[in-house]
């Protein structure tokens, strides 16, 4: 029995040695496997044959120990050694080496698996995978690149496809704001339009060309004058006559020259009457004259000519029998001077003074001889009920461009009106009323389609009916402002237009900063003399200008735009008599949440001085401000505040530093809000002016993912082409209570075992797990020297066991030989 047990016992030793050699072979074979952990064999005795359990001490015997014979060895454990492997730099930034405890978590065919092999790659779906194809698991990010610590997901690095933008949060300004400006001499700039007219009010139509003509006096050279022996009342004396043509409305033309000079005795039945024969008749072109009036002097043959009577225009004779005491009205023998005359006709209300705009210019009508007049016919009377008279205006030889009132003619009915002008220049020049060529004044409630202007030749409706799009661009501080569009209809008012222009010009109204109200009265208004007026904010850099081509209109239904000439002139310059210390302007670009560029202008001017301090006002404008989703509000003002400096030129307070730009049309987050950092400004008397510049802002345009880094805490940080960085994912390391209890599953993978405990996930460097080194790998921890020694010892053990078997075999052979 003893020899047999020796054989089996020696066999267990051989088996133990073989296991050791297997494990050593595996260790040596994986000495170049990244992340490999070598193993060692732990042996234990199998069981023993007890010959005696021994005896305890007695009074006569000291006791004996047990007598047991061992029956061999067994493999108690093949234990992996999780000592740190050497960390070696690799050529891939995606490789990671774990320094310390922990395992990378991957998605394998058998579920969640673990590895120390940090050789990683990117697959076709931008996922991070191991060299054997398992997806690396960790915490992903949402659309805003915030880590979502809920579920492990395959981590991705979308090089070239992921994009990100950074909205501006801070703008840093630098420069010097000079305190030596004479702020009390600062005045805002004012610009005014030409005088505009209310085209809604009725006005007279233009006269036809043949309705205006000079009138030639009747030719008296062929008129016969003889005393008549018939009955009459003419007394003795000498008499002269003049005749006048009269039209159907009773308007007298210029009278003829005096004729007759006839002397009568006044004897009864001899010459008590005077006959006028061969009286001239109007020509065919003078058919509008229906009557001839005859005027005569008294018996002195001198003095005023007074009305004797009248005959039809075609009559050729007249008998005068009127006594001096019965003569009628005195002849008005005035006439226009020799000149070239032009006329205007208006409608007028004698009760409230309302007057329409005039007709187009009538004339000029040249008068080259004395004693002439001018007839105006075909004047259409008003029909609206707003007027009850017609006014005639005319220039003079001396005041060619000034038109004085000639006559106010009451109207009734609808028949065309005629008028014969015989007014001398002296009377016109002395007239207290002159023509307002621009017509009735406008109001803020007037519809745009009735807004007219006089351009020297006629009246133009600035905005055609039917509606359309007005495009407007002005200048501010000499800089062209971006064009803004305004949709108008037939009911859009002047107030709406000037509100739009006020917004497009970026005028900061006094109430835009309730905490520190702006000085002056900046903004838009309609003046008492019917002009559009815009008052700028203080500071020469805020001075406004509108050139004649600032407006363009695209009528509804039209494809091409047309210009609108609306001239503005400067009536007050935004100036500083003392130019030192004038403000400055900074132009810069910020970015919204979509990475779209947004232009901003910040201007400054000295607003106040108080003892040992002075205050500058800053005004911010952005042409990209979108206050409402319809685009009807084009206000470009986005912020205002004050900066106060002490006597050393240092900032002591800033009333407001926030800028808010609405983005209600663009799909980005609205408003885009950011802070102005004035900490780099000084307030020193340097040079003759001020300076201001934006030196830095923290926003950025869109950029694509161009590279990445992995931190020692396992965060994957993406670097975008615009310089921004974002977290793309968070690697997790798993640790176990008993690493040796893990199950090796091939491909450098481990699986949780029944004795490993549950995986505890955490960020590298926290909760007892190691850190990561990017761009490096952890080499195998196989100790070749130790394994070679173990191999020698195992080989020796194997040979020793074989010798035991050989010895037992020899003894058995001897035992068997006893039979022979």
Image: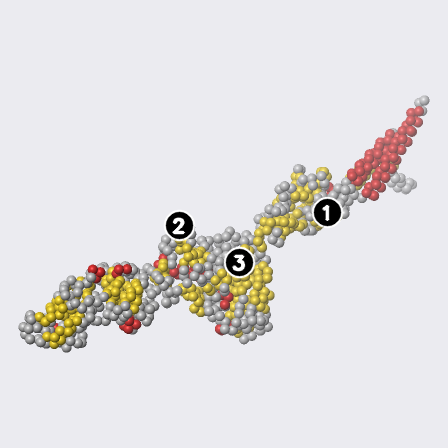
The image position of residue 664, as x and y in percent, is: 48, 54
Which of pointers 3 and 2 lies earlier in the amino acid sequence?
A: 2
The earlier-in-sequence mark between 1 and 2 is 1
Note whether residue 559 is visible: yes
Residue on which disc 3 sits: 599
Looking at the image, which is closer to me, 238 or 90? 238
Q: Residue furthest bottom?
A: 300
- Asked whether the residues under the numbered discs 3 and 2 touch, taking CB atoms below 8 Å apart as contact, a structural biologist would say no
Where residue 90 is drawn, which disc sits there?
A: 1
Residue at image coords 57%, 70%: 683
Is residue 182 shown left or right of residue 256?
right
Q: In this view, does 523 lie above or below 758?
A: below
Measured from the top left, where is residue 49 in percent x and y? 85, 34
Q: How far apart are marks 1 and 2 (CA)?
A: 69 Å
Please, what secondary structure does the residue beneath circle 3 have?
Answer: strand
Name the quadrant containing residue 118.
top right
| Residue position for label 2 | 557
């Amino acid at each position: 029995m003893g020899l047999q047990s020796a054989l089996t016992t020696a066999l267990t030793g051989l088996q133990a040695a073989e296991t050791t050699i297997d494990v050593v072979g595996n260790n040596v074979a994986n000495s170049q496997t990244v992340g490999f952990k070598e193993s060692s064999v732990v042996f234990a005795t199998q069981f023993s044959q007890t010959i005696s359990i021994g005896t305890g001490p007695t009074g006569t015997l000291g006791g004996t120990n047990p007598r047991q014979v061992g029956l061999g060895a067994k493999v108690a454990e093949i234990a992996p050694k999780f000592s740190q492997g050497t960390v070696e730099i690799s050529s891939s930034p995606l490789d990671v080496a774990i320094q310390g405890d922990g395992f990378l978590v991957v998605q394998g065919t058998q579920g969640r698996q673990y590895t120390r092999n940090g050789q990683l790659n990117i697959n076709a779906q931008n996922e991070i995978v191991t060299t054997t194809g398992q997806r690396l698991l960790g915490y992903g990010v949402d659309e805003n690149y915030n880590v979502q610590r809920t579920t492990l997901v395959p981590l991705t690095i979308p090089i070239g496809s992921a994009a990100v933008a950074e909205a501006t949060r801070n703008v840093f300004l630098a420069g010097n704001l000079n305190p030596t400006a004479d702020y009390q001499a600062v005045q805002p700039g004012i610009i005014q339009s030409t005088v505009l007219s209310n085209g809604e009010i009725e006005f007279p139509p233009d006269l036809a060309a043949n309705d205006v003509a000079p009138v030639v006096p009747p030719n008296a050279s062929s008129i016969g004058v003889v005393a008549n022996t018939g009955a009459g009342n003419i007394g003795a004396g000498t008499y002269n006559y003049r005749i006048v043509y009269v039209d159907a409305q009773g308007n007298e033309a210029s009278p003829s020259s005096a004729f007759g000079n006839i002397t009568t005795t006044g004897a009864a039945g001899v010459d008590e009457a005077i006959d006028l024969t061969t009286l001239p008749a109007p020509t065919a072109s003078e058919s509008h004259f229906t009557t001839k009036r005859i005027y005569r002097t008294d018996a002195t043959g001198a003095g005023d000519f007074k009305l004797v009577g009248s005959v039809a225009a075609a009559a050729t004779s007249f008998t005068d029998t009127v006594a001096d005491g019965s003569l009628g009205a005195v002849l008005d023998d005035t006439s226009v001077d020799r000149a070239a005359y032009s006329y205007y006709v208006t409608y007028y209300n004698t009760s409230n003074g309302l007057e329409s705009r005039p007709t187009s210019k009538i004339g000029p009508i040249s008068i080259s001889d004395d004693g002439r007049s001018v007839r105006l016919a075909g004047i259409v009377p008003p029909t609206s009920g707003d007027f009850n008279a017609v006014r005639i205006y005319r220039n003079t030889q001396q005041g060619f461009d000034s038109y004085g009132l000639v006559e106010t003619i009451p109207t009734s009915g609808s028949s065309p009106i005629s008028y014969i002008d015989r007014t001398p220049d002296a009377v016109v020049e002395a007239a207290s009323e002159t023509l307002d060529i621009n017509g009735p004044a406008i109001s803020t409630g007037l519809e745009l389609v009735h807004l007219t202007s006089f351009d020297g030749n006629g009246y133009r409706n600035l905005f055609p009916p039917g509606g359309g799009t007005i495009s407007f661009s002005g200048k501010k501080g000499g800089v062209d402002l971006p064009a803004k569009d305004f949709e108008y209809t037939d009911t859009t008012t002047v107030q709406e237009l000037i509100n739009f222009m006020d917004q497009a010009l970026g005028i900061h109204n006094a109430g835009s900063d309730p905490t520190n109200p702006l000085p002056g009265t900046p903004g838009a208004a309609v003046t008492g003399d019917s002009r559009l007026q815009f008052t700028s904010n203080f500071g020469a850099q805020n001075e406004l200008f509108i050139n004649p081509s600032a407006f363009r209109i695209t009528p509804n239904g039209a494809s091409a735009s047309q210009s609108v000439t609306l001239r503005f002139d400067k009536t007050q310059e935004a100036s500083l008599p003392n130019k030192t210390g004038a403000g400055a302007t900074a132009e810069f670009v910020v970015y919204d949440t979509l990475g779209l560029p947004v232009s901003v202008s910040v201007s400054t001017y000295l607003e106040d001085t108080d003892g040992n301090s002075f205050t500058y006002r800053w005004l911010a404008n952005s042409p990209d401000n979108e206050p409402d989703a319809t685009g009807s509000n084009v206000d470009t003002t986005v912020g205002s505040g004050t900066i106060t400096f002490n006597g050393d030129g240092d900032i002591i307070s800033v009333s407001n530093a926030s800028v808010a730009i609405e983005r209600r049309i663009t799909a980005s987050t609205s408003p885009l809000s950011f802070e102005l950092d004035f900490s780099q400004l000084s307030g020193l008397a340097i040079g003759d002016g001020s300076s201001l510049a934006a030196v830095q802002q923290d926003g950025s345009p869109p950029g694509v993912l161009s590279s990445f880094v992995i931190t020692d805490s396992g965060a994957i940080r993406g670097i975008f082409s615009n310089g921004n960085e974002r977290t793309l994912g968070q690697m997790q390391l798993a640790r176990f209570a008993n690493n040796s209890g893990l199950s090796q599953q091939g491909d450098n993978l481990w699986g949780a075992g029944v004795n490993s405990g549950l995986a505890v996930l955490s960020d590298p460097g926290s909760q007892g797990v190691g850190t990561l080194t990017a761009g490096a790998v952890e080499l195998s921890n196989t100790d070749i020297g130790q394994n070679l020694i173990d191999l020698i010892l195992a080989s020796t053990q194997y040979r020793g066991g074989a010798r035991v078997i050989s010895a037992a075999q020899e003894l058995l052979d001897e035992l068997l030989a006893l039979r022979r």
